[in-house]
Image (tube, rainbow, N blue to C red):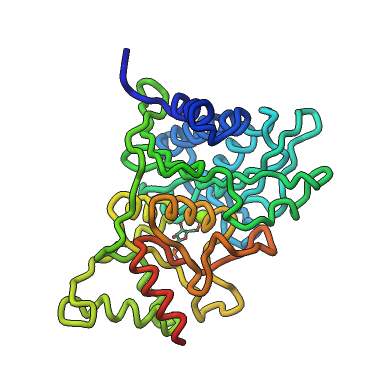
Amino acid sequence: MSSKVSLSRYLVEQQRSKGKIPADLRLLLEVVARACKSISHAVNKGALGGVLGSAESENVQGEVQKKLDIIANEVLLEANEWGGHLAAMASEEMDTIHPVPNRYPQGEYLLLFDPLDGSSNIDVNVSIGTIFSVLKKPESSQGVSEQDFLQPGKQQVAAGYCVYGPQTTLVLTVGDGVAMFTLDREQGSFVLTQENVQVPADTQEFAINMSNMRHWDEPVRRYIDECLLGQEGPRGKNFNMRWIASMVADVHRILTRGGVFMYPWDKREPHKAGKLRLMYEANPMSWLIEQAGGASTNGQQRILDMQPTQLHERVSVVLGSRNEVERLTQYHAKV
Ligand code: AHM
Ligand code: MG
């Protein structure tokens, strides 16, 4: 018998021996993983599957949707609708929530996702991914409404992403650390390839879109200026920079070897808190990073403590190696 641990077995252990998740949450996560597998196949086919290019439509954020944004959204909706574990879903690609249709049993969980994060990378064959977050529907609520979703990230019961890169890797937390599973295409299953993932507290690598530098606020500018001065500057060490423009891929690198990721508020659109979305991008990624010993803030506040007021709310994000996030927080406090 193989000693490989499949995602299914890992989840059964989280349910049975660790008592971390109930059976219906385990089944929900199996369904999400199955949907990710099918998205991975579509991504892999690329031009051969006719899935590249624009869908010539816009989402609620006014962004042009790619064909794969829509395909991934539909795969997730269809896979999760009928299982009986969910009350409703919400997605970056849908204006409002999607309650489970009446013909199916209603469950007690809420699922949020960015079906295909890093859309600008789809057509150029660079890593992209799916991000997801699971909340429990408040017990007091009758039916289901958008209000039920507006819970701080610290109330998530599961969170993760699947990165479609050279390998397809599913990364998951149910509050018991972070585990990584690699898709074995021959077996058709996700296999546990790393457990107890830890983000080093220190780093010499940062991720930010440098082309926005002139629009940043003082604390972010100061931090990056100091990094760029390298060994001769106040930090006394050289820094490397990486920016993939897929949050999944940048966060995956940080979970693997450390680093700090920033998508800060900037002056281009001052009324927007940031570019990234709180509920289905920043919250799940923040919980994963914290579960791996890192930290996550909007500069002023721990992201997981933020009370959302809107489903598609945006937020400024700084996350990764703890000591760097702490330094950025201090710079923000001094303004
Ligand atoms: P998307 O969800 O529409 O793909 O946008 C989110 C992405 C993140 O994955 C990434 O960090 C960021 O947008 C890149 O933005 P930019 O192109 O401004 O560098
Ligand atoms: Mg996204």
Using the image as rendered, state which of residue 183 and residue 238 is in the foreground: 238
Instruction: Tell me the residue at 45%/24% (across/down).
Output: 9
Residue 215 lies in quadrant: bottom left
In the image, farthest residue toward the right: 142
Image quarter (top left, top right, bottom left or bottom right) of the N terminus? top left
Using the image as rendered, state which of residue 147 and residue 68 is in the foreground: 147
Instruction: Tell me the residue at 32%/52% (across/down).
Output: 253
Instruction: Tell me the residue at 76%/29% (across/down).
Output: 105
The answer to whether residue 108 is above or below residue 228 is above
The answer to whether residue 211 is above or below residue 242 is below
Q: Position of residue 214 (x, y in %)?
A: 40, 82
Q: Position of residue 274 (x, y in %)?
A: 53, 70
Q: Position of residue 303 (x, y in %)?
A: 53, 63
The answer to whether residue 232 is above or below residue 282 is below
Instruction: Tell me the residue at 61%/77% (across/down).
Output: 271
Using the image as rendered, state which of residue 44 and residue 82 is in the foreground: 82
Q: Position of residue 86 (x, y in %)?
A: 68, 36
